[in-house]
């Protein structure tokens, strides 16, 4: 009788273990840690200086650098009162406008991209490969080429001057990359999960919402952070589609106006800029674990 040997997982050789240990030792060496600390300090130093400048009096900001704060510390909240209470600045309205623009501009492409990625990964239909290649190829289209055609369409439809052009424009620009990234993530999910759900009588809708969405959370969070940061910091799309009015203009547009019309108002620029970075920094810190998991998703199989 012939005995068929069981298939076992290949053992890791001592050479591979040695190479891994050497690589880990190099990455965890004191010089690598020192370099990481230096890069982190240099990266955060301008933000720290901006924070100190936002609390310094106007005359101190115009006369001396932010590093002189340690020799003559003077703190005031007048800069923040000015950007929120002044009728000419009124940063609070633009802050709310940015939130009104960012939240739908993140949720719309994520919802559509998740559905489209699932269809491309697990549903067979005619022309699927050609359509997926076309969606992937849309990533190479420069954003600037589409601004005038989109603006013409929005003006003809009659939605210019509202939030809709900004929502639709940001969603359109984000969809190709979102579909591509989520498709690659969904494709790595074992087919056994899908087959088990089908055996239990689940259709595509049940599979997507009950099986896929919980597994897609890291990928959705990772792309959601990227999209939120992109939309929040955007100025070009806001200049084109906001219509130049204050009712739908984001905070970046008002900061640009402060730079142009108040070139000497450094105290307002410092406090206003720091207000504008509070939300993206908070979002990143709150969703950091999902962000890292989303970046590493699919990198290791098994």
Image (tube, rainbow, N blue to C red):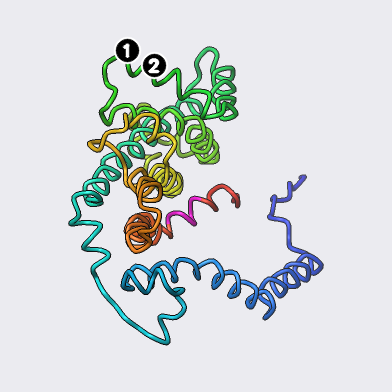
Q: Nearer the viewer, residue 246 or 98?
A: 246
Q: Which residue is drawn at 27% across and 33% down?
A: 245
**Residue 281 is covered by the magenta coloring:** no
The answer to whether one can see residue 216 in this image is: no
* Count of residue discs: 2
Asked if residue 21 is positioned above or below residue 139 in the image, the reply reads below
Q: State the image quarter where residue 288 is shown.
A: bottom left
Q: Alpha carbon of mark 2 to alpha carbon of mark 1: how far?
A: 6 Å
Give how far across and how far down residue 7 sits, in percent: 70, 50
Q: Are marks 2 and 1 in contact (CB under 8 Å)?
A: yes
Q: State the image quarter where residue 154 is shown.
A: top left
> Would you name the residue on which mark 2 appears?
152
Which secondary structure lies at badge 1? helix
The answer to whether one can see residue 170 in this image is: yes
Asked if residue 165 is positioned above or below residue 221 in the image, the reply reads above
**Residue 291 is covered by the magenta coloring:** yes
Question: Is 101 situated left or right of 294 in this image?
Answer: left
Give how far across and how far down residue 221 sits, in percent: 41, 48
Magenta stretch bounds:
290-294
Q: In which quarter of the image is the N terminus?
A: top right
Asked if residue 166 is positioned above or below residue 157 in the image, the reply reads below
Q: Residue at x 43, y 36 (%)?
A: 196
Label drawn at residue 156? 1
Question: Is 166 situated left or right of 162 in this image?
Answer: right
Q: Residue at x 30, y 42 (%)?
A: 103
């Amino acid at each position: 009788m012939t005995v068929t040997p069981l298939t076992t997982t290949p053992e890791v050789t001592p050479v591979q273990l040695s190479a891994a240990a050497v690589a880990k030792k190099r990455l965890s060496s004191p010089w690598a840690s020192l370099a990481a600390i230096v890069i982190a300090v240099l990266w955060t130093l301008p933000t720290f200086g901006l924070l100190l400048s936002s609390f310094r009096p106007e005359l101190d900001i115009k006369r001396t650098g932010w590093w002189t704060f340690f020799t003559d510390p003077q703190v005031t909240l007048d800069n923040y009162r000015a950007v929120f209470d002044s009728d000419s600045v009124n940063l609070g309205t633009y802050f709310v406008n940015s939130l009104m623009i960012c939240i739908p501009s993140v949720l719309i492409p994520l919802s559509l991209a998740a559905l489209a990625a699932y269809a491309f990964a697990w549903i067979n239909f005619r022309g699927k490969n050609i359509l997926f290649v076309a969606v992937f190829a849309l990533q190479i289209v420069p954003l600037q080429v589409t601004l005038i055609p989109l603006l013409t369409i929005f003006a003809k439809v009659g939605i210019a001057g509202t939030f809709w052009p900004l929502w639709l424009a940001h969603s359109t620009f984000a969809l190709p990359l979102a579909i591509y990234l989520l498709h690659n993530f969904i494709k790595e999910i074992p087919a056994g999960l899908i087959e088990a759900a089908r055996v239990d009588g689940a259709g595509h809708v049940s599979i997507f919402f009950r099986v896929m969405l919980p597994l897609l959370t890291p990928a959705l969070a990772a792309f959601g952070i990227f999209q939120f940061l992109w939309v929040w910091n955007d100025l070009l799309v806001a200049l084109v589609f906001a219509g130049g009015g204050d009712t739908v203009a984001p905070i970046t547009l008002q900061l640009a106006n402060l730079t142009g019309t108040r070139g000497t108002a450094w105290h307002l620029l410092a406090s206003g800029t720091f207000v504008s970075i509070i939300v993206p920094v908070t979002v990143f810190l709150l969703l950091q674990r999902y962000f890292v998991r989303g970046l590493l998703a699919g990198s290791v199989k098994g």
